[in-house]
Amino acid sequence: MLRKRKYYVRHKILGVLQDNLSRFDAQEHVNIQDIKLTLQELVTASHLNEEEIIQEMNYLNGIEEIEWIWQSGVQSFIILRKGTISYFDRHLLYEGRKEVLNDINDYLKNIATTILLAIAGCTFIFNLIDTRQNQKNIYKMESELRQLKDTVQMLKQKK
């Protein structure tokens, strides 16, 4: 499917966090310590690299789909309700596909504009060439007409 990788990575992160949260669905009381995942656990579970995860975590935290927790120098993450909804609605995958389609649309518009500009330029040049040729033909016909007129006048004067 066409989509930018960052959207796939964001969806994958939400998926891993949601899967971890879902393990505790049947329990009444869940401790936040149980549902949070450390960065290393997230790297292991998602099969993504650490740098990619951190980069996208900043975004997901900024739009309040995850919570970033620092405890004793260790960073952990939990999925928030908004993130769960986004994951199950496949919102980020849809946004990624939409962005790629918009990029393709922009690219096609640029190509179409370039082609139309080239066609307009060629049409202008061909019209210019035709106009010059027509002007030469008009001058030639005017010259021939003058010669005919002069010839007719000379014939009238001889009579």
Image (cartoon, rainbow, N blue to C red):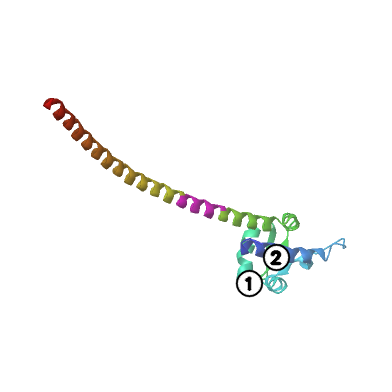
Whole-percent x and y of residue 116? 46, 49
Q: How crowded is mark 1: few (under 14 residues within 10 Å), some or many (20 or more)?
A: some
Give the magenta-colored segment's residue range: 105-115
What is the residue that sits farthest to the left in this orientation? 158
Which badge, 2 or 1, comes first in the chain's sequence? Answer: 2
Distance, label 2 to label 1, CA atoms, is 13 Å
Q: In the picture provided, is 134 more to the left or to the right than 40?
A: left
- Choose between 140 and 87: the one closer to the eye: 140
Q: How crowded is mark 2: few (under 14 residues within 10 Å), some or many (20 or more)?
A: many
Kindly identify which residue carries mark 2: 12
Whole-percent x and y of residue 37? 73, 68
Q: Main secondary structure of the magenta part?
A: helix
With respect to residue 46, does 138 lie above or below?
above
Q: Can residue 32 be seen in this view?
A: no
Kindly identify which residue carries mark 1: 50
Nearest to viewer (mark 2 / mark 1): 2
- Name the disc covering residue 3, or none: none
SS at mark 1 in the image: helix
Residue 106 counted in the magenta span: yes
With respect to residue 2, does 114 lie above or below?
above
Three-letter amino acid code at the position of disc 1: Glu
